């Protein structure tokens, strides 16, 4: 019998009900909670500050570890709390049973503990990264990896009654797995799989409910990760800089030095080899010896046999970067450091600013030892680094507001200091100070860095090539600021600009192979290493020999110091030369061959630097 036209009896129409909770699995909830903050905000933010060296910049201006941690912890906690609250509210509004069926107070406690675990986990992980890109990639791998393993591995073990519970507890010590297990329990109770209408506080004592164990585990995770994060943050070796001694937690038991009287009877680093001792270095060492025996508060910085050795790797010999350096700089003086690349200037400044520890010897800044009192020294120190370390999203005024507060400026005093600083570096007018730093030119950023180093009346200021990238007008303005600022403090300035060194610095030290070859004021250096004229002449190549003969008629002891493509430069002893004779010889030579250009100058600071650097 054919049944082609047989149909079912009509039924009452009904709507298709899809429980979103069955689609959005526990795995997805795990990703949502983990993904946003640990990776894209907290970890990235912390590593960014380290990568851009903003953290060490803040530290060098007086920000201690405790306030840094508390500020970031409070910021991350507030941000995470808002996110978690919105997470629960929106989940409840769309009717997800994971939120509506379970007691909200239990959810609150669970997410509250989880937030704290994630924050300390981000701090802990940030200690092992110096690149934002790598940290972000590893963070995403952790999030998705822990979610996937939780969904496919931990889930299987939880439901396998034969699997040892102790092993599950150990697995749940991983923060990602403990989060998954907590959401798993919420999901099981909200789905009525345990014969209840959702999780209540009374259900925590149920044998099948693992929530109580998870809450305890997460508290233990937080208690373990917090001290570990703080420890590794303080002793981690990143970019070759040792943050603190390995026994950082025992630091509080060590007696702190408050003045250099403590070491006056025992010379530190007495075994230093001084290979290039010269009259200037000897005199400076005698001054330091006297100050160690009879301290003088007028001296802002004293270096006593400061030495730095970089130990060779893979069989390479040790590198002696700073050789038993002794130096005394009084208040009101700008001390300039000149030297070729690789001479040891950076190592010296790094030791003075606490970036690396000295191998032996020590230095005192405002009476405090750089080996034990760097936190106190930072409150009296200003630093203008070689490369501008600024937040691109903050304005110039906000930078000065932040660093001014680190120097304990408040209220009207702080606002006046900000306005004065902006005016002094020509960033006040036209609303420049209210613009984000990302909109600044390179020269404007440089001027802001100088202003930051001087705000708050620091007793010692380190400036590393402060006028780099500035136009002539801005450079002259900056030099005026530095000369005005040195009246109340000591300034240590490194530069490759001989003009800057001559105008700004009261004393100069030429640093060669780890030590000062000479120390004196610019005029004295030119007089000492000068005593010569510099004669320069440019001709065609075939007349070079005739030029040499002309010069030796003027000065028999003349020495050629430069030669390239017909241009020759000679050093002439002043006692052998009469300027009138030079003009007469040159005019006579013009009749014999073509002279493109010539000149006679006194010895410049650049000539002195070249002579000293070459070991003359």
Image: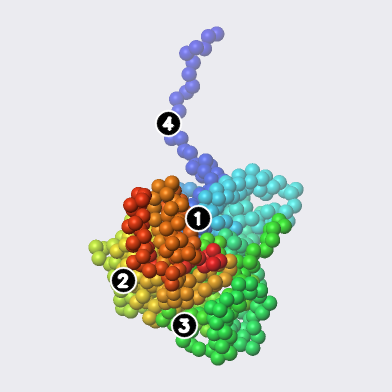
**x and y percentages locating residue 43 in the rendered image:** 52, 57
Q: In front: mark 1 or mark 2?
A: 2
Mark 1 and mark 2 lie on one chain; the one further toward the N terminus is 1
Q: Are marks 3 and 1 in contact (CB under 8 Å)?
A: no
Q: Are marks 2 and 3 in contact (CB under 8 Å)?
A: no
Mark 3 and mark 4 lie on one chain; the one further toward the N terminus is 4
Mark 3 and mark 1 lie on one chain; the one further toward the N terminus is 1
The single residue placed furthest to the top in the displayed view is 1
**x and y percentages locating residue 390 in the rendered image:** 42, 62
Q: Nearest the camera: 33 or 362? A: 362
> Residue under circle 2?
424
> Residue under circle 3?
330
Q: Crowding near pointer 3: few (<14 within 10 Å), some, many (20+)?
A: some
Q: Are marks 4 and 1 in contact (CB under 8 Å)?
A: no
- Separation of residues labelled 2 and 3 (CA atoms): 24 Å
> Residue under circle 4?
13
Task: Name which residue lies at 47% across and 77% down.
Answer: 520
Q: Are marks 4 and 2 in contact (CB under 8 Å)?
A: no
The quadrant the C terminus occupies is: bottom right
Q: Secondary structure at mark 1?
A: helix
Q: Secondary structure at mark 4?
A: loop
**x and y percentages locating residue 295 in the rendered image:** 53, 89
- Separation of residues labelled 3 and 1 (CA atoms): 43 Å
> Residue under circle 1?
44
């Amino acid at each position: 019998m054919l049944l082609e036209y047989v149909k079912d009896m009509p039924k009452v129409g009904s709507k298709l009900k899809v429980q979103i909770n069955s689609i959005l699995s526990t795995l997805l909830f795990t990703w949502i909670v983990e993904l946003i903050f640990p990776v894209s905000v907290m970890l990235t933010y912390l590593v960014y500050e380290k990568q851009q060296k903003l953290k060490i910049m803040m530290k060098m201006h007086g920000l201690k570890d405790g306030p840094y941690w508390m500020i970031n912890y409070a910021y991350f906690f507030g941000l995470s709390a808002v996110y978690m609250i919105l997470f629960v509210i929106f989940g409840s509004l769309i009717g997800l049973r994971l939120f509506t069926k379970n007691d909200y107070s239990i959810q609150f406690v669970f997410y509250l503990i989880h937030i704290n675990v994630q924050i300390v986990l981000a701090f802990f992980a940030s200690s092992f990264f110096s690149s934002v890109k790598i940290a972000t990639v590893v963070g995403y791998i952790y999030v998705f990896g822990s979610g996937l393993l939780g969904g496919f591995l931990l889930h299987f073990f939880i439901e396998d009654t034969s699997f040892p519970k102790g092993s599950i507890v150990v697995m749940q010590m991983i923060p990602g797995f403990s989060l998954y297990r907590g959401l798993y329990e919420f999901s099981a109770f909200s789905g009525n799989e345990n014969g209840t209408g959702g999780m209540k506080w009374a259900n925590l004592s149920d044998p099948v409910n693992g929530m109580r164990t998870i809450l305890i585990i997460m508290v233990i995770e937080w208690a373990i990760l917090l001290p570990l994060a703080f420890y590794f943050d303080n002793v981690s070796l990143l970019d070759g800089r040792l943050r603190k001694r390995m026994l950082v937690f025992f630091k509080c038991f060590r007696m702190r030095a408050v003045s250099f009287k403590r070491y006056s009877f025992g010379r530190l680093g007495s075994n230093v080899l001084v290979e290039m001792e010269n009259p200037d270095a000897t005199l400076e060492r005698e001054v330091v010896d006297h100050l160690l025996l009879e301290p003088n508060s007028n001296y802002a910085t004293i270096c006593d046999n400061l030495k730095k050795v970089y130990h060779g790797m893979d069989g390479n010999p040790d590198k002696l970067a700073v050789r038993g350096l002794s130096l005394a700089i009084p208040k009101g003086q700008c001390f300039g450091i000149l030297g070729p690349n690789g001479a040891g200037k950076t190592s010296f400044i790094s030791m003075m600013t606490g970036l690396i520890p000295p191998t032996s010897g020590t230095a005192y800044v405002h009476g405090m030892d750089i080996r034990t009192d760097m936190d106190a020294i930072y409150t009296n120190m200003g630093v203008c680094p070689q490369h501008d370390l600024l937040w691109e999203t903050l304005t110039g005024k906000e930078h000065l507001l932040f660093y001014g507060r680190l120097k304990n400026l408040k209220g009207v005093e702080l606002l006046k200091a900000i306005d004065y600083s902006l005016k002094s570096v020509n960033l006040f007018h036209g609303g420049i100070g209210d613009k984000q730093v990302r909109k600044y030119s390179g020269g404007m950023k440089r001027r802001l860095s100088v202003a930051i180093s001087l705000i708050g009346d620091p007793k010692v200021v380190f400036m590393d090539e402060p006028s780099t990238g500035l136009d002539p007008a801005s450079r002259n303005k900056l030099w005026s600021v530095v000369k005005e600022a040195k009246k109340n403090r000591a300034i240590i300035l490194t530069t490759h600009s001989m003009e800057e060194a001559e105008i700004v610095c009261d004393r100069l030290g030429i640093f060669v192979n780890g030590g000062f070859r000479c120390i004196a004021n610019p005029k004295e250096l030119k007089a000492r290493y000068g005593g010569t004229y510099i004669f320069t002449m440019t001709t065609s190549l075939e007349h070079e020999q005739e030029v040499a003969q002309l010069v030796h008629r003027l000065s028999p002891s003349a020495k050629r110091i430069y030669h390239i493509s017909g241009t020759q430069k000679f050093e002439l002893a002043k006692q052998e030369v009469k300027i009138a004779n030079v003009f007469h010889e040159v005019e006579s030579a013009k009749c014999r061959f073509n002279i493109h250009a010539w000149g006679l100058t006194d010895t410049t600071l650049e000539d002195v630097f070249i002579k000293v650097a070459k070991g003359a």
